[in-house]
Structure formats: structure tokens, C-alpha cells
Image (cartoon, helix red, strand yellow):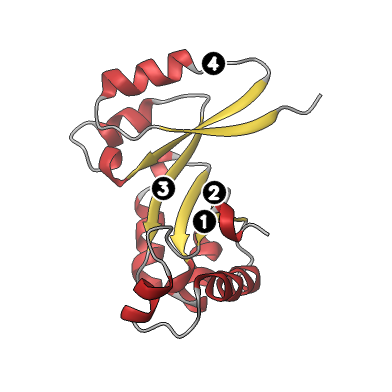
Amino acid sequence: MKKNKIFIACDSKSIHRIKKIIKKTKNPKLKIGYKFGLEFLNSKNGRYFLSKLKNKIIFADLKLNDIPNTCVSTIKAIKDLKVNYLTIHVSSGLEALKAAKKVAGKTKLTGVTTLTSLDNKALKDIGFNKNVKKLVLHQTRLAKRAKLDALVCSPQEVK
């Protein structure tokens, strides 16, 4: 029987709280992964904790958004953490996405489309001429061209 995969957000910088989350979410019927964001990975002990975490599916929600060289360097810098999933903003551009995919190895590269905090007005304010739905569709096509492994988008754009 194939187990369903679910990711639990570990949105804290407290190691004690993260250990509690992991302990409480053990479930033999589900394949559970743990998502760690910038807050945790940049906390005093976050990186060390992650490096010692064994037999867990790790999702590093770093939302890389930079030039190709910096995205590549960042992926290389965290190779020791052996993350299973890593996020990168599709808005980094095709070259950055392709370069990141090339060095990601076994890490599944997950493209982040338009942030859920941005509505049509906010997009216009920052210079986009497409509405949210059209922009996400455009970004999805770009992620596909870069051969990313997955996408992150809001439920409103899933369709």
C-alpha cells in the first residue's frame, strides 16, 4: 500500500517545540515530512539540529530568489543537510531555475509561484501587468521548462 505524503510546518525556532511536533505527528499510515523555513534554519541551533535529524523527510522552505550563481552556491552550501525538498522562487528566472536544478542532485526542487500575500493590486504596484491567476499560470509554464519537481501555489490557483 502506498502511503500518502503530508508535510508538517515546523514554524518555530525552538528545538524543544520542534521535537514535540515530530513526536506528536508520528503516524504509520502516513509518510510525514517536516517543513523548516528561514526562521528555523537561521536560528542559533536550527542548522545543527537539522544535520542530526535522521530518517525524516526534510523540506527546506528557503524560497531562494537570486541570480543563478547565488542559487547554485546556496544549494551547494546546504548539501550536508541532505534535504529532500527545497523551494526556489520561479521569479528567479529560467536560467537560475535550470542552474539550481542542475546542482540539486537528489533534492527535489520546488518552485514557488506568486506569494499568497500578493493580490492583483500589489502585483500592479510592483510592476507586473498580469493578474494573479495569469501570472501563476505563466510561472507554472516556466517551472515546467526548467524541469522543476513540484510547485507551491495557493489553493485558488491549483486549478
**Residue linked to disc 4:** 26
**Residue linked to disc 2:** 107
- Could you tell me which secondary element the residue under label 3 belongs to? strand
Q: Quadrant of residue 129?
A: bottom left
Q: Quadrant of residue 30?
A: top right
Task: Say which label, 1 or 4, has the lower sequence index.
Answer: 4
Give the amino acid type for the residue marked by disc 3 in the picture.
Asp
Spatial separation of the CA atoms under disc 2 and disc 3: 12 Å
**Label 2 crowding class (10 Å Cα cut-off): few <14, some 14-19, many 20+?**
some
Q: Measured from the top left, where is residue 156 in percent x and y?
A: 57, 57
> Quadrant where the C terminus lies?
bottom right
Task: Say which label, 3 or 1, has the lower sequence index.
Answer: 3
**Label 1 crowding class (10 Å Cα cut-off): few <14, some 14-19, many 20+?**
some
Position of 158 with respect to 33 (left or right) is: right
Spatial separation of the CA atoms under disc 1 and disc 2: 5 Å
Instruction: Name the residue: 59% across, 68% down.
Output: 143
